[in-house]
Amino acid sequence: MNILIVFVLHCSMATLARSAPLQSEMGALVEGTQFQEIVLRSRSLIEKILLSIPDTHKECIHVETLKLNSSENANFVTMASTIGIPAAPVLKVVSENFSLETGLRRMSEGLQLHRALLRSVSPRLEQKDRVIGLQADIRDLVVQINKMLKMAQAEAVVLPSPTPVALRLPGEYEVQVAAHLTLVQLQAFGQDTMRCLRDLDRSNDEETQS
């Protein structure tokens, strides 16, 4: 029995010894000056995106029943599937069960998905200036997220590529719903992205300590 306990303890300590350097290495990476500069640029861009979504929605959606912040949006799940709008990747704050690399990869994939959706629907919109501007901001944010992803990867891995999107938009109403649901989903995904980036921002710790 004593031998078994010693063996189990030895295996546990070995596992901790292997994982501790990796966790320490990631902690040092996140706290590094270069990584933090990218985090701050990314936070600025996602704030800009979130602030622009209401005005973008107001500009391009003219069906009065389609409201950006409405409990009725949950009723469009079936129509979103019919039109061909994929669900956004699930984002979580970095933890032992959700790695930095996974979080950054999903941020990149989700942002590229919404940029592709906007690019797909925008030619059918009467007013599209803000939609085009939003696409440019998302593109700029993807560049920053991918920079952090490259730094976080232990090995050289292919970066996430844009998701092919083929929306089924037979009429004007479907175009309006597609644009509406894309902005609704982008807003929710952007809020999750903001929370994840805030968790990576070490300037918050400095402000708390001071």
Image: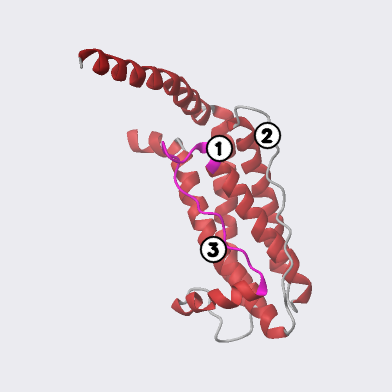
Q: Amino acid at mark 3?
A: Gln
Q: Out of 19 and 92, give the one closest to the viewer.
A: 19
Q: Is residue 139 left or right of residue 21?
A: right
Residue tagged 1? 101
Give the residue at mark 2.
157
Magenta range is 83-102
Between circles 3 and 1, the one closer to the viewer is 1
Q: Earlier in the sequence, mark 3 or mark 1?
A: 1
Q: Which badge, 3 or 2, is on the more N-terminal residue?
A: 2
Numbered disc 3: secondary structure: helix
Q: Position of residue 171 (x, y in %)?
A: 73, 84
Residue most toward the left? 1
Q: Main secondary structure of the magenta part?
A: loop
Q: Residues within 10 Å of mark 2 (few under 14, many from 20)?
A: few
Quarter in which the C terminus is drawn: top left
Is residue 183 highlighted in magenta? no
Disc 1 to disc 2, C-alpha distance: 11 Å
Residue 210 in sight here? no
When the figure is inspected, residue 95 is found, relative to residue 58, above or below; the finding is above
In the image, is 71 to the left or to the right of 40? left
> Which residue matches tag 3?
187
In the current view of this chain or complex, which residue is farthest to the bottom? 64
Q: Residue at x 67, y 84 (%)?
A: 173
Q: Quadrant of the N terminus?
A: top left
How packed mark 1 is, by other alpha carbons closer than 10 Å (few <14, some 14-19, many 20 or more), is some
